[in-house]
Amino acid sequence: MSPLSLLILGDGRFPSGGHAHSGGAETAIAAGRVHDAATLRDFCQGRLHTTGLVAAALAAGAATGYDPLSLDEAADARTPSPALRRVARRLGRQLMRAVRVTWPGPELDDLAAARPGGAHQPVVLGVAARMAALTPYDAAQAAAYDSVCGPVTAAIRLLGLDPFQATAVTAGLCGDMEHVASQAAGHAARLPAEGVDALPATSAPLLEITAEQHATWPVRLFAS
């Protein structure tokens, strides 16, 4: 295992396309539900423990070597919003391009061939973690971090939030991210015995609803 590989995956400069997505923060800010560092923290914490947990478990599952196509189908079933399914596959396709250059391997090639339109981003992330010799827990950590850093980065641009305050929000959620990653790795460990039913299906209905609304906006700063 190389901790540096985990740092590369989590680096905002890694060309995975995440910088163009707010993780639902744009609609939350427009509605006034997120307006400062405290409400941003609440938003990120809620996202982390719902859809973030699902993403982390999918990533951990893929990192164990479990069938990524089955995990991709499980991700579809856990994402009711068509807009969010499209976003997840778009991000997965972009991430796939980056990781196939960084950590090339037959598992990535097979997944790319089976899902030319893109597999769900957490599934690609988990396969990438496996290619980078990372553990399922590492993959879950990367997914948990991603579920927080997207909205935080977007809030800097959308709210003009002080970057120091934004970083404090992320740092303040480190314990939550570790807890979610541990939960996710535990779910993934049960995949061989229970199949995809072992994965969590925690949801955030408001994120699903607002994602559909956001997709209809004629003018927006972020793609989602």
Image (tube, rainbow, N blue to C red):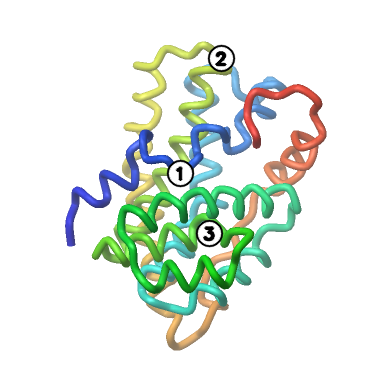
Amino acid type at image mark 3: Val
The numbered mark, 3 or 1, whose residue comes first in the sequence reads 1
Amino acid type at image mark 2: Leu
Residue 43 disc label: none
Q: Nearer the viewer, residue 59 or 12?
A: 12
Residue 54 disc label: 3
**How far, Cα to Cα, is label 1 from label 2?**
24 Å
Relative side of 70 to 217, left or right? left
**Residue under the image location 50 percent in, 85 percent down:** 194
Q: Are marks 3 and 2 in contact (CB under 8 Å)?
A: no
Asked if 10 appears above or below 165 in the picture, the reply is below
**SS for callout 2:** helix
Asked if 136 appears above or below 25 in the picture, the reply is below
Q: Position of residue 7 (x, y in %)?
A: 26, 44
**SS for callout 1:** loop
Residue topped by disc 1: 16
